[in-house]
Image (cartoon, rainbow, N blue to C red):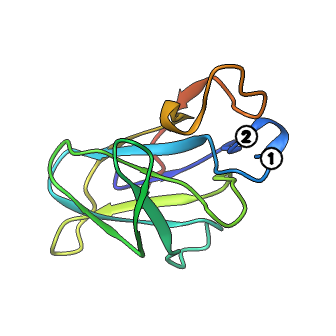
Amino acid sequence: TGQVLVGWGDGCTNDDCNGGNQRSEVWISPTADAVCSVSFEGDGVKSVFQISNADGDVIDTVSSVQLSKWESTTIWDHNDQDMTGAMVYCDDSNGNPVPFAAVWGQNPERSYSGDDFALDLGTLIPPYPC
């Protein structure tokens, strides 16, 4: 479907990022060109989020991101470092839902060896019916 509901999505161990950035993020990749957005509170209201480059550096703050077929990006909540309960949506240029792959997991660019605040794991996020 064109949306997913993130179950458990802590950004760091015990939701404590030790003053740093979220280590675990939601990774998405649509099956066709799409505009993707997120509601961090799961209430359908679009949230502003930061997007990063491959090195983990923040490159922009947006309310949606345009992705080409199979292009991927990460989404993370820079406010409370927690993606639990977030809804992610992808639509085509006509507003029709676009199916996409979504996973939650650690971003190695935001962690380091011996990082006691990182959650070294990940999981698939199943589709949520539109």
* Residue 36 or residue 92, whichever sits in front: 36
Residue at x 64% of width, y 48% of height = 22
Q: Is residue 52 above or below residue 121?
A: below
Quadrant for residue 112, please give it. top right
The crowd level at tag 2 (other Cα within 10 Å; few <14, some 14-19, many 20+) is: many
Q: Is residue 4 left or right of residue 115?
A: left
Residue at x 84% of width, y 39% of height = 14
**What's under tag 2, amino acid-wise?**
Cys
Mark 1 or mark 2, which is nearer to you? Answer: 1
Residue 130 visible in this rendered orientation of the protein: no
Label 2 element class: loop
Residue at x 15% of width, y 57% of height = 33
Q: Which residue is mark 1?
A: 18
The x, y position of residue 106, in whole percent, is 56, 32
The x, y position of residue 13, in whole percent, is 79, 35
The crowd level at tag 1 (other Cα within 10 Å; few <14, some 14-19, many 20+) is: few
Q: Is residue 67 left or right of residue 114?
A: left
**What's under tag 1, amino acid-wise?**
Asn
